[in-house]
Amino acid sequence: MDDSAELVYELESVGFDYPGGTTALQEITWSVRRGECWAVLGANGSGKSTLLKLLDGLYYATFGSLRFCGDALSEKAFASDDFNYAFRRQVGFVFQDPNVQLFSASVLDEVAFAPLQLGLSDAEVMQRVEQAMQALEVTKLADRPPHHLSGGEKKRVSIASVLTLEPQVWLLDEPTAGLDPRSQSWLVGFIRQRHALGETIVIATHDLSILQQVATDCLVFGEDHRIAAIGSPDDILADHALLHACNLMHQHPTKALYQTHGG
Amino acid sequence: MKNALAKTARTVSASLAFSLAAETTARQGGLFQRLDARTKLLSVLALVLTANLVHQPVVLVFLYAAILPLAAASRIRVRTLARFWLGIPLVAALIGVPALFITPGPTLYRLTGGLAISATGLRSVTLLYLRVGTSASSAILLALTTRWHDLLHALARLGMPDVLLLALGMTYRYIYTLLELTNDMLTARLSRSVGPLSASKQRQVQGALAGTLLARSLDMSGEVYLAMRSRGFSGRARTLQRGRLQWLDLVWGVGLLVGCTLALWMGR
């Protein structure tokens, strides 16, 4: 970890409660520096997705403070168009469910959506769209409606639609969920490529198989919505007691069941 | 009610299949597919207006019949078009049946019970059939030969506000996502059904499915809004402008204008 690199995110005792009082995050103190690649690990419902939404300024912390490059991420800050556009140009969020992210009538419209909203000229929009579609190998899908795409194609288009922002920070929510092995392998390659370019990456996942391939650092959530551990992928994967406690690893009960029932 | 769930599942599957078939038809290299979406949109408007302003059934028959060679030139299967070309006007004509008896005019045919078909009534119902047939068939021709996003771009170029276009695009997009979800839920439920379900049980299942679908669509709409915000949407949408008029659009436009003017003059 390069401690001299610029701080991208600073979280100080951050907590988040959903309307109605359900607690999603408690006492999160954590920081992300430029060029790091973090894996946020945790069982379903532990708060990983909520944390990413806080980092993308889609939700605002109920408690504590959250800063991006020194600026507080608050509702007041996003009320300013200048701040909103400057932030959105730097941070790209790939949602877990591509159906949520692909809301336009065609793939081309989808990929063009972000640069259009950010006020780029038509020529620059088309240039970014063509580059992103080539990089993600989805050019031939340009005129297809998103509901006619396969799962792997939807994921590629989702990423292309974020790549047109040319973000310096990537937030990926369960990126390998529902992908076949070839698409998973391609995605791991894509994340490594972005990281090699010096971009900052935060991945929420409970897929331990990709951890060592993509992440430089890990943050583990406990089921109490608090940070259970922070460390390198090797250290975290070696700590089986931690992984069991956080519901990220579990012993198959088959043998025990057979023994109990005399099988 | 015996197989209401299975019937719903079949209808949903048929809708999804129709969407795929329409997408395939729109990619064919037929006459209408080669035209710019703006030309097609304005052509359909011109045909609908002409059909509703013409008063001579003979001229309307000509317009109604002209849809068939246009569909053939656009590589639309006769079976696909027939459902709309015959079905929709037939329903309209059935709704208009009382007009046969209540419209004042010379009697054409007297039925038992004091009922009589008037010549004016028959003419009104015929005009209704032909007008609905021409209007609906030309709209179907547009829908089957134009991809939805091309149609949206055409509307954008014709001045429709971007926010409205975005809403239309998303409506179309999510109809199919929700249909797929409905299909999955129905299939999952049917796969766990052993033996026939009673009518009340089927109604119960349908109600539960509708409730779940509503809850899921509400959840999804919230997530979609976040996904839009994440990519810079702040309530003022901007969409791509594309599509280029070609010589074929010009030739077609002039031909259609002449045809419609002639029809209006002959059918006044």
Image (cartoon, helix red, strand yellow):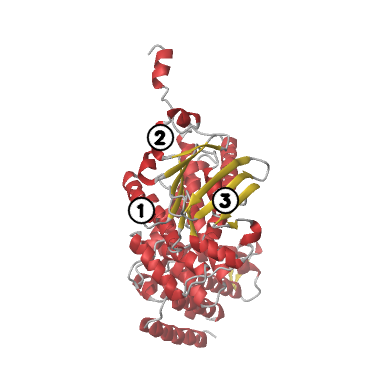
Quadrant in the rendering for residue A67: bottom right
Which disc number belongs to residue A54? 3
Residue B78 in the image: state x and y as whole percent.
37, 64
Q: Which residue is located at x 43 percent, y 44 percent?
A: A217
Quadrant in the rendering for residue A109: bottom left
Is tag 3's residue or tag 2's residue first in the polypeptide sequence? 3
Q: Say which of A187 and B243 sits in front.
A: A187
**Is the residue marked by circle 2 packed among few (<14), some (14-19), or many (20+) residues within 10 Å?**
some
| Element type at mark 3 | helix
Q: Name the residue that disc number 1 marks.
A: A190
| Element type at mark 2 | helix
Relative to residue A34, is residue A262 depicted above or below? Answer: above
| Element type at mark 1 | helix
Relative to residue A114, is residue B208 depicted above or below? Answer: above
Residue type beneath disc 3 = Leu
Q: Which residue is located at x 38 percent, y 19 percent?
A: A255
Q: CA distance from mark 3 to mark 1?
A: 24 Å
Residue B48 in the image: state x and y as whole percent.
52, 76
Q: Name the residue that disc number 2 marks.
A: A237
Q: Say which of B173 and A41 sits in front.
A: A41
Closest to the camera, between mark 3 and mark 2, is 2
Name the subunit of mark 1.
A
**Is the residue marked by circle 1 packed among few (<14), some (14-19), or many (20+) residues within 10 Å?**
some
Residue type beneath disc 1 = Phe
Q: Are marks 2 and 1 on the same chain?
A: yes
Which disc number belongs to residue B83? none
